[in-house]
Image (cartoon, grey):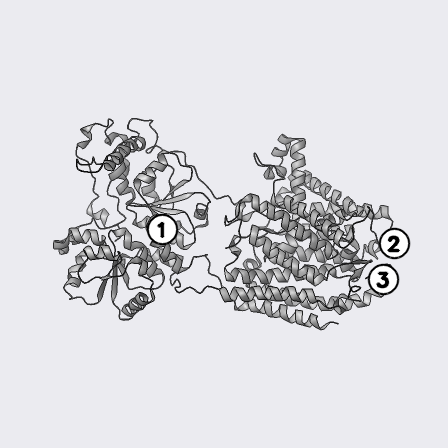
Amino acid sequence: MGPLFPNGLISGDWNLVFAVLIGIAFGFLLEASGFSSSRNLAGVFYGYNFVVLRVFFTAVIVAMVGLLYFNYFGWLDLSKIFILPTFLPSMIVGGVVMGIGFIIGGFCPGTSFTAIVIGKLDALVFAVGLFIGIFFFAEVFPYIEGFYYKGNLGNATLTDVTGISAPWWAFGFTVIALVAFWVSWLIEKKVRKRIKDYKF
Amino acid sequence: MNRNYFLLTILMLILAAGTFFLKKQTDYKQINADKLLWEIIQPSRFVTTDQVARMIIQKDPSLEILDVRSPEEFAKFSLPNAINIPPDSLMAPSSNDYFGIPGIKIVFISDDGIKADQEWVLAKRLGFKNMYVMKGGLNRWIETIIQPKEPGESEPYTAFEEYEFRKGARLYFTGAKVEKSTVSKKVKVVIHRKKKAAVAAGGC
Amino acid sequence: MHVHESNPQKTLITIILFVLVIVIGFLTLHRPRFKYKLNMAESVQMLQNKTNCFYPWQLPDVLDKTHPKVVLIDIRNKFVFSRGHIPGAENISAFDLTKKKNIRHLKALAGKNVTVVLYGNGPLQANGPWMWFRMVGFSNVKYLAGGYGYYKAHKDNLAETKNDNSYLTGIPRFNYAVVASSKNVPATTTQKMKKPVIVRRKRKAAVAAGGC
Amino acid sequence: MKKSNLNNGTHYINPYLGGVLMGLLMIVTIFISGRELGISGAVKDTVVEAAHIISPTAAKAHPYYGQYIKEGRSPMDSWLVFEVLGVFIGAFLSGIIFKRVRKPFVEHGPNITSRRRLLVALIGGILWGFGTRLGRGCTSGAALSGSSTFSFGGVMVMLLIFASAYLFAWLFRKLWT
């Protein structure tokens, strides 16, 4: 049955309508979970607020497990969905740069947008920086083009690269995430005693 | 510490462990065997040479002819804009681009329709839609379109109409009196490659 | 108060709903009656096999009942069947092939190592069902080359058709490129076109390349 | 119960509820569109559009912009742009419901000034903009959606973002604590 759009069950226009609706739900969830505050987000790296870890990993494990079931039921054809391509060197550098950006800026692109609409100026400045960053990237692109396309593994899945089947990955992620949830609780309890201006 | 968190943890673990019991998917996505037979016995999956000729003449943009003969034979003669996909290359990823394009009718042709029919069944098994088989294949194409027989006196009026059409079609396809380039010369092949965007587009 | 000390009721409800959806998925999971025994590559391979078909010249043995290990099955509908069929053939219309009763019958025949020969009107009709049976694991199923039409035309001299090739498939009967070129087609559409048609039959040697 | 999730005086939903719903939302997204959530792609589309408006010929010839400009179709006419539009609406709805929409203000850690916060936010934004293009996506597009669909690159980017942020966290601790 699914995915509906690649299978031609809904038109491109409806796909865009659903894009808006999905975006609304996504924005709502991000904001309601507390991702609109850079202090909440940065908290994960200083141990006083693990909301990012909780939301993020819960979402990943639910989606991973759900996709496997849906694929099995024939509701969703996993071979037809978009798999993020892998370009080893550029993605490694990209990940590191994004990590530094995260700890300095306190937002990631999606969360900054949710923070803008509730009136945070730092998020607005962050978003401006985002545009500048991409513009800057495009300007230097001719010089790093070779690097950008290097190490292309194609739309590689974890199974393609490691040979370990998807259920193992889903189960592994679930166990790691659940352990992380419990451990983060203990860390939070300790660290929060030291922080005063921030209400939990 | 709330007890419900233990419950959630256990539920999630069970759900994740449950994925181990899902049977492995085959390499190719295939339709159910029951459904395949049902599709096979539909007579509507056959088209006649006249229908194909009419679509080619009208330059029907939704028509895509897939020739399943060997590349050598294909090089010698083919219908206008036909694409060559022998059975063994059916499952090559490159051929898959031709299938499953919305709004495109695929017509399989071979020498006599049998090979085309077999490839139709294989492609159908892979779940592709909008596919037809030209009944009688190229042999009947020659018999009906290129060398049509005049109907006898006693035959119904429609037979004569058909004959008239075939005579016209013959001129069109052999280029006897119309422009030179139709069949013998390589016609510019319009390839409807599936837009990859539909499936693979994405990324942040 | 920490989030782990509050009651995650809504989360629990959502997860339980999710589990319910999965349970519904399991309940509604359609279990197909037939499973492919040949994968795609094997199916393509199978088509190359020369012994896939049953030749008309093999028919007399069957008709004489000297060859009891062959059962003919007419897959045309009842009406057409009643108007004429190969003697001794059973009639299972293509639409009824997968009925439980018929599958049981076919399975029994497969168990007894009986060759089942499907035939339809022309060569094309039985081709699809035959392929399907092969793919779901009935390796004893063949199809009659040429179909009923060929049998009817050569009813009286079946044994002699061994040297005929007109029931073989996958053979170009014309040299397309030559026949379809403008030279060999009368330019005018007058009565002149009644001149004898040059049918370039391929040589016997080349014919052997065609499948059954 | 009401007090439980109070954070800086406002009420957030249980993070696990948010996570489960977000996971289900991703499944729904994949079910409908066959693709995943993402944010930075939309920003890129906007930048491409801007470049295209400013100088169509130069943008088309540009090795990076050029690959996203197609005849007769605006780069902004993309799934992600519409999705991001929805993100704004959704976040605003949530902000209203939970009474978090305020007059513009700057949120910052206790040990830095607003101006400093704005400066580091800008630098962070630039780093993100650059990083997302190299990493083929941001936290939502590459890390969250990528890992959910078992993409090798997605998991790699996710781990690297968190690893490098933890690595540099000590250096920038003044900003946040």
The answer to the question of whether label 3 and label 2 lie on touching residues, with beta carbons closer than 8 A, is: no
Residues B19 and C172: in front is: B19
Name the residue rendered at 24%, 31% in the picture: C185
Q: Amino acid at mark 2?
A: Asn
Q: Secondary structure at mark 2?
A: loop
The answer to the question of whether label 3 and label 1 lie on touching residues, with beta carbons closer than 8 A, is: no
The CA span between labels 3 and 2 is 12 Å
Q: Amino acid at mark 1?
A: Glu
The answer to the question of whether label 1 and label 2 lie on touching residues, with beta carbons closer than 8 A, is: no
Q: Furthest residue to the left? A: C156
Left-right relation of B125 to D2: left
The CA span between labels 1 and 2 is 72 Å
Q: Position of residue A17 (x, y in %)?
A: 60, 46
Q: Where B138 sits versus B13, above or below? A: above
Q: Which residue is mark 1?
A: B119
Q: Residues within 10 Å of mark 2 (few under 14, many from 20)?
A: few
**Quarter placement of the C terminus of chain A:** bottom right
Chain ID, mark 3: A
Q: Secondary structure at mark 3?
A: loop
Q: Which numbered tag is attached to residue A195? A: 3
Q: Position of residue B187 (x, y in %)?
A: 38, 33
Q: Are marks 3 and 2 on the same chain?
A: no
Q: Are marks 1 and 2 on the same chain?
A: no
Left-right relation of A83 to D116: left
Left-right relation of C148 to A172: left
The CA span between labels 3 and 1 is 70 Å
